[in-house]
Image (cartoon, rainbow, N blue to C red):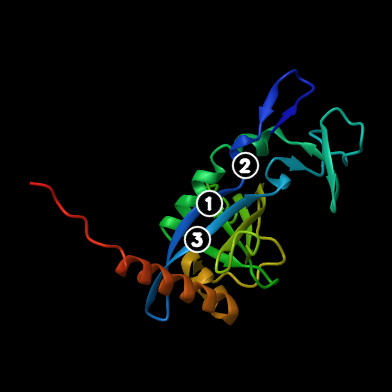
Amino acid sequence: MHFDGPDGQQYSLVHLKAQKCEIKLKIDNEIYDVPAVLVFSNHCYTDNQNQDGTDVQEGDSWYCLSDDKGPRAFCQKRWKASLTLPEYLITMIKYELDCYKLNKAGFFIRIHDNDRDQKYAGWYVFFSFSPANDHGPGIVRISVTSHHHRKKLPDSVRSTVKFKFNSLLAQWFKDRPPHLAALKAMKKQAAAQEENIPLQETGT
């Protein structure tokens, strides 16, 4: 996984491969160890504009790929910021950092590295939750749909009320009873397996 730049440099994308993690989540006074899969879209390292501000066209020197949004150019600024993105996602989860809700259900943003002079300027992590059915029942996919620098909140922000990351994920499960039921079944199965593990004899 890499992009061969016209500057002769090879830009590795290995750090943006999907990775698994576990999230400790409290739902209705019950604690769950939620298995999750983190995935990162090409918008974490591409842009729809070239460095000179023109729209990207196939054949441009930094053209990288086309998706449902159109042609996209490799963006050195976004790529450099993406190098620490997976680690930042883990931090956001571990420390239950503040996020904002977007109008579309299940989509959220987190602002980090804020500019001191502008309240809402900084790097934005756009992410969503969805069932990771291809990995098994009860597993959630956390998709980073974009990661880029902005000077103001997007129009799609529902309000300026902040929510803890884990509370957003807990509500996502509560709004989807089949996925919450699968999560409960996983916890019950894990507990049953622990009870059936025989104690090891210690030698003398």
- Regarding residue 183, the answer to whether it shows in the image is yes
Q: Is residue 71 left or right of residue 2?
A: right
Mark before the other along the chain sequence, 1 or 3: 1
Task: Give percent across and percent down for residue 7.
Answer: 76, 19
Q: Could you classify mark 1 by the number of other residues whose Cα lies within 10 Å: few (under 14), some (14-19), or many (20 or more)?
A: few
| Residue lying at 72% horizontally and 45% vertically, measured from the top left | 42
- Regarding residue 119, the answer to whether it shows in the image is no
Q: Which label sits on residue 3? A: none
Can you tell which of label 1 and label 2 is closer to the viewer?
Answer: 1
| Residue lying at 53% horizontally and 51% vertically, measured from the top left | 20
Residue that carries the numbered disc 1 in the rendered image: 20
Q: Is residue 202 left or right of residue 130?
A: left
| Residue lying at 79% horizontally and 34% vertically, measured from the top left | 51
Residue that carries the numbered disc 2 in the rendered image: 16
Can you tell which of label 2 and label 3 is closer to the viewer?
Answer: 3
Task: Give percent across and percent down for residue 9.
Answer: 71, 20
Identified by mark 3, the residue type is Pro
Secondary structure state at the residue bearing disc 1:
strand
| Residue lying at 74% horizontally and 41% vertically, measured from the top left | 46
Distance, label 2 to label 3, CA atoms, is 18 Å
Secondary structure state at the residue bearing disc 3:
strand
Q: Quadrant of residue 96?
A: bottom left
Q: Could you classify mark 3 by the number of other residues whose Cα lies within 10 Å: few (under 14), some (14-19), or many (20 or more)?
A: many
Mark before the other along the chain sequence, 2 or 3: 2
Vertical relation: 129 (above or below) 92? below
Q: Could you classify mark 2 by the number of other residues whose Cα lies within 10 Å: few (under 14), some (14-19), or many (20 or more)?
A: many
Vertical relation: 176 (above or below) 58? below
Task: Give percent across and percent down for residue 126.
Answer: 64, 56
Distance, label 1 to label 3, CA atoms, is 7 Å
Image marks 1 and 3: residues in contact by CB distance under 8 Å: yes
Residue that carries the numbered disc 3 in the rendered image: 35
